[in-house]
Image: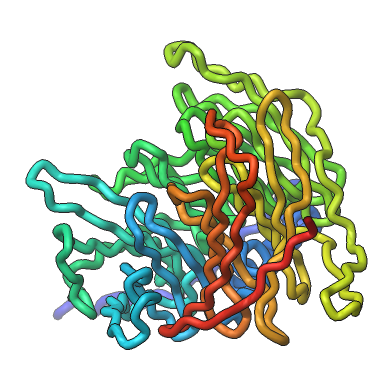
Amino acid sequence: MSSRPSIHAPHPTTPRIIPNWISAIAQKLLVLSRWTGSLHGSFFPHLALSNEDIVSRFSSVVHWTVSQIKAFAWHPHTLKFSYALKDDTVRVHANFTELASSLKHTELVPILKHKLQKNVACLAWHDVPEANKVYSQFVYISSHGYQPPHYFLQYLHLLQKPNQSLATRPSSSSVQVLQESGHCPITSLSWSPDGRILMSSSPVDTAMMAWDVALETCTPLRRFGGGGVSLVAWSPDGSKLFSATPSNLFRVWETRTWSCEKWSTSTGPCKTACWSPKGNILLFATENQPVIYSLTFSEVSDETKPVIGGSQTAMACADLSETDLQTADSSNVKVGGLIQHMAWDSKGERLAVIFQGNCEYVAVFRTKLFPVLEITSCGFVKGFDSEKAEFIEFQPNYSKGAMLTVIWSSGRVGYVPMYFVSSSSTTTVSSLEEEFKYQQHQHTFSNGLYSTTD
């Protein structure tokens, strides 16, 4: 007889009993985690915003969400600039002085476009002369898509020989994507003056990223506190780096050993900042006060001994509270208020300021660095009727004085050449008067207005 296999009834699974003390600890840890998250969000409310709203809040453009031009950047060495439009394209203009002299001249405008290029937040140029005399020109674009993982730092490589035109639409093979997890959206880019390091920052990341673009690698520079990094700016001499946070804290780093000093404000986060030509004076303004402050730093005499040497207390050097301005037709307009963005020309002679809200005027100031910093009112720039100033930037290394570029709400780019004898010049011209010419650029040129208080 064959033996019949025995059949056993399945044993019921005995439930595991979690000790009460483990359950109590788990519940308390969950409550603590939720409380910490809500506390972190209450300290840094920007973390609850969407990426688009974060960019809009920390962008230097006044109305980034609805602005026709989302970002703008001058080339550091040549007569060329790039700007990003609402349709997510980036365009490059060059030789516009030739266009100004002949309105019938057709200007070749390279268009940069990539499928991942969405919501461009900022632009940065890099120009490195190669040994074969071909100039490698790079446009760095910070943008973010609507769905992960399309948050990236985009890099476009444009080759150009002297007097050789660019293709109107570079191929997609010229695009290289650099990305870092958790480092989005990027709201600020800044190249070191020697062109070796590209620094990027995001208001949701407490680390700045120092990019080695050739190797496609980045090194985080992190300090806890502040809730992120909203703005970065190298000093012109390369010895220091300014970084602002979404909180009342900002830092200045020395770039040899990467130590830093920090300052705190009582009037809100730092909204904008700019360096003097030698990197020994920093001007900044906060989000909630219409005042320009200055910090003075020790000049670097020995590069082997890194030092920051910033003054302990910032000095208020200009009050830009809203006031009435009488125009040529005897009507009164309001100018001034909370500051959105500042730009300082490369000679340290002119400072331009745009304001938050819907101000139609750009304020221009004369600045004197020696023996002490002086800021005096110079005049106001106004666009056409109903135009609002969205962004400003000086052309680097303008030889005849200072060239202010104004982005208007209509989508036009205006140029304000300011011709003057530098205060550091030994030449004396008793009868010299500053000339102010104003041009509007939107593939054509037309007249505008520059009014002075003198």
Task: Choose top left, top right, bottom left or bottom right for residue 341.
Answer: bottom right
**Position of 270 relative to 177 (above/below):** above
Q: Residue at x 58, y 34 (%)?
A: 428
Query: Colour mode?
Result: rainbow
Q: Is residue 262 visible?
A: yes
Q: Residue at x 73, y 41 (%)?
A: 249
Front residue of 445/17: it is 445
Residue 167 position, x and y percent, is 18, 75
Task: Choose top left, top right, bottom left or bottom right for residue 67.
Answer: bottom right
Q: Residue furthest front?
A: 431
Numbered marks: total: 0
Q: Is residue 228 visible?
A: no
Q: Residue at x 89, y 57 (%)?
A: 321
Left or right of 20? Residue 69 is: left
Q: Quadrant of the N terminus?
A: bottom left
Left or right of 57? Residue 75 is: left
Q: Quadrant of the C terminus?
A: bottom right
Q: Residue at x 86, y 49 (%)?
A: 319
Residue 212 position, x and y percent, is 31, 43
**Position of 371 relative to 70 (above/below):** above
Front residue of 326/16: it is 326
Residue 99 position, x and y percent, is 35, 77
